[in-house]
Image (cartoon, grey):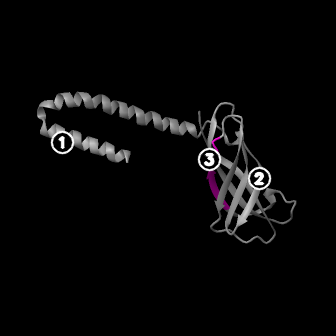
Amino acid sequence: MPIFVILAAVFGFLVFLILKPEFRVMALLIAAPVVALLTWYFWASEAETDLAYERIAPDEVTIDLTDLEVVGNRIILNGRAVNGSGTWRLREVTVLMRALDCPTEESTTAECLITGEATALFRPDIPAGQARSFRAAFLFDHIATATGIPKFDWEITATRATQ
C-alpha cells in the first residue's frame, strides 16, 4: 500500500508540473528536499534492519525446559528461551532442527545419521536478561525412516533484536 501511495503522489506531481508550468520552479524546490528526506529515511531504515540481526549472537540465547510433540511429519518444540543479552530485546529466533537416526540411545550427534532438517522461526519478545515460553513448529517434508533410535537436535541459527 505505501508503494501505491508514493507512486500516486509522484504521478500527481508530474501531472501538476505539466498542467501548471508557472509553478515548476516552486514545485521542484519543494520536491528536492522531500526526495532527499525519503532517500535518507530508506537508507537509514535499511541499515537498522541489518543491525537488528547482528545485535544478539545466537550463542547468547539459551533454549531449555524443552518438550517435543510429534504430529505426523511435524515436530513441535515447546520450551523456554532465555535472552542472555544485557541490552537488547530479543524479537525473533530462527532454529534449525535435525532428525537423527542413531545406532544406540547413548550415541552422540556425530555418530548419528541426519535423516531430515527443518527450520522454524518464533517471536518470543524477550526483554534483556529475561525468559519466555515459546512454541515452534517444524515441518519435515522429506524425512527418511529411522532404522535405529530416532532423536532430534536443534541449534539457534539467527536472532533479531531491538531496543
Q: Which residue is mark 1?
A: 15
| Three-letter residue code for mark 1 | Val
Give the quadrant of residue 38: top left
Q: Mark 3 packing: few (<14 Cα in 10 Å), some, or many (20+)? A: some
Q: In the image, what residue occupies the spot 34% across and 30% down? A: 36
Q: Is residue 92 above or below residue 36?
A: below
| Three-letter residue code for mark 3 | Arg
Q: CA distance from mark 1 to mark 3?
A: 45 Å
Say if the magenta span includes residue 124: yes
Q: Which residue is mark 3?
A: 123
Q: In the image, what residue occupies the spot 68% across and 34% down? A: 128
Q: Is residue 52 above or below residue 4?
A: above
Q: Is residue 68 above or below residue 94?
A: below
Query: Residue 42 location, x and y as percent?
Result: 42, 37
Q: In the image, what residue occupies the spot 68% across and 53% down? A: 135
Of 5 and 158, nearer the camera is 5
Say if the magenta span includes residue 150: no
Q: Which residues are magenta?
A: 117-125
Query: Residue 23 location, x and y as percent?
Result: 15, 31
Q: Main secondary structure of the magenta part?
A: strand
Query: Residue 34 location, x and y as percent?
Result: 31, 31
Q: Which residue is mark 2?
A: 66
Query: Residue 88 location, x and y as percent?
Result: 63, 34
